[in-house]
Amino acid sequence: MGFFAGLVIGVVFGLGLIVAFVRSENARSKKRSDLATTVAAFARMTVEDSRKLLSPEYYPSWVVFSQRQKLTWLNLHLDKIWPYVNEAASELIKANVEPILEQYRPVILASLTFSKLTLGTVAPQFTGVSIIEDGTEGITMELEMQWDGNPNIVLDIKTYLGVALPVQVKDIGFTGVFRLIFRPLVDELPCFGAVCFSLRQKKKLDFKLKVVGGDISTIPGLSDAIESMIRDAVEDSITWPVRKIIPILPGDYSDLELKPVGILEVKLVQAKELTNKDIIGKSDPYAVLYVRPLRDRMKKSRTINNQLNPIWNEHFEFIIEDASTQHLVIKIYDDEGVLQSSELIGCAQLPLSDLEPGKVKDVWLKLVKDLEIQRDNKNRGQVHLELLYIPNGMENGFTNPFAQKFSMTSLEKVLKSGNKGKELVENGGDVKQREVIVRGVLSVTVILAEDLAPADFMGKADPYVVLIMKKTESKNKTRVVNDNLNPVWNQTFDFVVEDGLHDMLIIEVWDHDTFGKDYMGRCILTLTRVIFEGEYKDTFPLDGAKSGTLNLHLKWNPQPIYRDS
């Protein structure tokens, strides 16, 4: 009897083990299948899918989405033929580059030529290729190239003092993106009329200078002059939007040449909360602005001493050659005087493609340490700009505020005249200069404020607004609204403005107390927008306050006058 009981129990236990094993295998198989389905789903994900799941701020800085395809096959073939490319290209490069270097030769040098030029044994590596869909007729291709070469480049340099120095350019490291444009497309082999090539993006360009058998520092400033010459030559001769055109078929390709396409008007208004770079006192900030980093096309503001919230209100003008790809770059420096080089406080850039032609754009840009690394969590301050992009031929579908038919012709004359705001008037054979003044009446309606920060112990405030024209220091103020953090005023004030281009409206909010007053914030406005648009209504955040906005209505009544000079 015990035997049969044990047999039954053993069979039941064995069947139980078999059932448990089968269920475990089925569960593991289902998990593997689900995991495979998930992996397959991730494999099918596109860049757009991933961007929908995670916003850009959640990606680490090393994550880059690239549309470029690898070119391993090209690099293998290039390695094989590089010795022949080196021999064939060295003399060609020497003949074409020498005139460019001569064009940018520093004034301290009498002559500059190549005594040796070979490209070395290390071939460049093409790390990717992409086709750009820009809506134009033709094919645009971009090639990313990296070269850490060992070329043998020796410059034969002679100074006006009669000193001859052989300077070696060594340890060259370059990473960049070249753009090739095949245009126009034709029905004759090779099916395109010309090829344009340009350095679309220069990510890295490093090199060292060494005097053969000597020390380059023996002549002060020589190393910096040569390095600056090389970088300027690269920037101005081949860097986009500059392009070289190689005709393939006979024809007129003047439409492919570099031409100005518009003007960018920039008003540098102010900066706030700049990092203090001085141990004693505060920084002495100034700004450098450029679209192309060429010495003759970079603009510099005045220096404002001992100030972390500088107000410049300066106007600059830039020539634009390609609004779709160019950027406005601004760098804020701390002026350290004559004996020391200036220290960078922060920098920012704005793509011109963000601007609507003919419309003033008012922006605050966050300053970062490096333009290549935008994820900078440290607060280095902000810079306030007003920008206006005016394309050539803007009359086709646009209202050009700088055109003669526009009511603000005086503004166009001040900004665009070659006589710096003066026009020539003939009177009986005599020629007089008449200076154009942008004069008018500015009407400001202070409508209301919202979400003001409490200034009293009871969690309320008694706010009023003070309006100040910066140049004339004329003031007006609203009535006091008691015990209210969302006051409504609806009061209008008129200011006679003698120079609208260079004046500013400062609006301050104060808390009225019996024995004094407490500051609650301010906003600073230039008159550019109201001069262009005639009138507008907008809401402005208060600077220097925890919270709060001002709702204003501004109207400009122009009264241009002429003053004989």
Image (cartoon, helix red, strand yellow):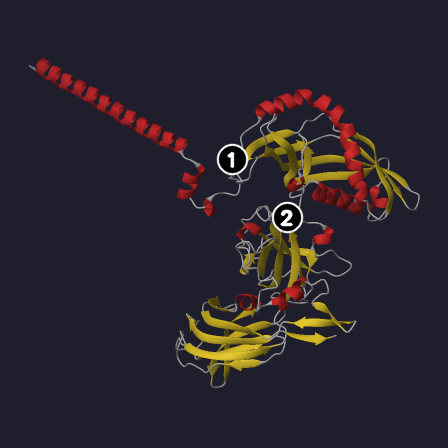
Three-letter code for the amino acid on which mark 1 is drawn: Gln
Task: Out of 176 and 209, give the one closest to the viewer.
Answer: 176
Label disc, if present, on residue 321 of the rendered structure:
2
Q: Tell me where residue 173 appears, x and y as whole percent.
A: 69, 36
Q: Residue furthest right?
A: 162
Kindly state the secondary structure of the residue where label 1 is placed: loop
Quadrant location of the C terminus in the rendered image = bottom right
Q: Tell me where residue 112 appears, x and y as whole percent.
A: 84, 40
Task: Out of 10 and 364, give the one closest to the viewer.
Answer: 364
Task: Out of 353 and 310, give the one closest to the viewer.
Answer: 353
Quadrant of residue 490 within the rendered picture = bottom left
Quadrant of residue 128 within the rendered picture = top right
Q: Is residue 140 above or below residue 394?
A: above
Quadrant location of the N terminus in the rendered image = top left
The residue that mark 1 highlights is 67
Residue visible at 62% across and 22% down in the picture: 76
Residue visible at 65% across and 36% down in the picture: 196
Disc 1 and disc 2: Cα gap in Å?
26 Å
